[in-house]
Image: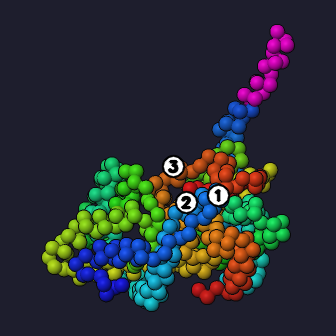
Amino acid sequence: MIASVRRKQPSRAILIVAALLILTAGCATAPNPADREATAEFAAVNDPAEPTNRAVFAVNRGLDSAILKPLATVYRDVLPKFFQDRMNDLLDNLRSPVIFVNDLLQGEIDRAIATLARFVVNSTFGLAGLNDIATDIGMEGHDEDFGQTLAVWGVPDGPYVMLPLFGPSNPRDTVGLVVDFLVDPFNLWAGNTGRDYAILSRAGARGIDQRAIYMEALDDIERTSLDYYASIRSLYRQRRAEEIRNGKPSANMPAPGLSQAPADRGAATPDRVMPTQ
Amino acid sequence: MLSRRSKLAPLGVFIAIAFLLAAPAGANEFEQRTEKFIVSLAQQAIESLAKRDVQRDERIRRFRVMFNDHFAVHAIGRFVLGRHWQQATDEEQAEYLVLFEDLMVVSYVDRFQKYAGENLRVVKSRVEGDKTATVFTEIVRPEAGQPIQVIWRIGAKGEALKVLDVLIEGTSLSQTLRADFGSIISQRQGKVAGLIHEMRLKTAELKLPAKN
């Protein structure tokens, strides 16, 4: 899979591979339409290409345990924390232009100004982004991407898709990934000046950085879940919903006792668990 | 006159009760109770789980007591099973609930402190109705990085307060478990017995000391 990736446009090549895999491999079997609850669950899970997705997930896990996880482990355990923090700050700062554009596209002017201010402070006083001093002085950052912007515009996420290398996604977020890549000034600069290695180095560094940060959480989920794939699928969706709400928990909280009533029908518990999605 | 007043009396009582339920004083008291509840939960986690010299079996035993005291274990278990609860036989339901408690205890004994430990700080809380509240907390990580947002959903059952759900960075524990268990059941032709088998295997595996 890696070999088939053209160096010029890595994201697009990977997407084509993903699309081909999904078209050629099997689809999940829908339950009997007469079984309404099973059909509703099938629709809610919204993973029509599940067998293919599971196959891609298995390949991703193989690549992860062979390459990414060992690298991230060494990175986390051997390199000084100082170096890791500078790397993280630098990579975060490089993302700022894309976050800024998405803040604007979502009509979040205050957040756009905050992103711009952080970028200016960190790129100058923070020594080209190596030090996130904006956070130190109380200007905390946030993340945005074009998948979230599309969601704010009302585009539905669509079925779950496991992308090779890139992991959990859906059509909306996949489009977002490509758009963010194409408008990123760093990528534009590197692409136009023939510095493809810079794009790949940055992507690699980001991968290792993020893998190291989520190492413990992912290990826990993998260790304790019965079906790691299904748990990741659920977590990805919940996490994206949270990111789209910009962490405002109130927006999607259901009224107490009303939520999930059909699924819990008859299970008259005095203290019903309140779901959040 | 008198008879008319007595006809209106039930309405008056109803309005009074409605006001009492909505009264900020009552809500504040409940809010404070739930916040205290979370703080004491964190305190207990520190006292009974934080000491490194405690054997794992003993930690599991202590966490089991905490978990049953402060979490609505059966309600969460039923929610997680969702529509399959109805399809399960009485024996399966009983076995499932026992295994569910066991699996949760061994799954969270090693990481509960991460989400309710010494770095827990209550940010705010919100009362929803007279029986549930949400407590927003932050787990401050001294080794840098932004604090982790942990939200506790609490239900009142008489005098007792019980945790109904924990949300870490927007991901709900009960939702995730429901997706996890639901997927296993659908792979086992909708049989709860298939899930029970998997739960037993996983619990046995997790009872062994964690490698990390």
Name the element at disc 3: helix
Asked if labels 1 and 3 touch by Cβ distance under 8 angstroms, the answer is no
Q: Is residue A191 visible?
A: yes
What secondary structure is marked by label 2?
helix
Tag shown at residue A251: 3
Q: Quadrant of residue A182?
A: bottom left
Q: Of helix, strand and loop, which one carries label 1?
A: loop
Q: Residue at x 42, y 76 (%)?
A: A24
Distance in Å between CA atoms under marks 3 and 2: 23 Å
Q: What span is colored magenta in the figure?
A: B1-16
Disc 3 to disc 1, C-alpha distance:
34 Å
Q: Quadrant of the N terminus of chain A?
A: bottom left
Whichever of labels 3 and 1 marks the residue nearer the N terminus, that label is 1
The chain to which mark 1 is attached is A
Q: Which is more foreground, mark 3 or mark 2? A: 2
- Residue type indicated by callout 1: Ala
Q: For the point 53% across and 70% down, which residue is it?
A: A28
List the residue tagged with mark 2. A43
- The quarter of the picture where the C terminus of chain A appears is bottom right
| Residue at (71% x, 47% y) in the render | B131
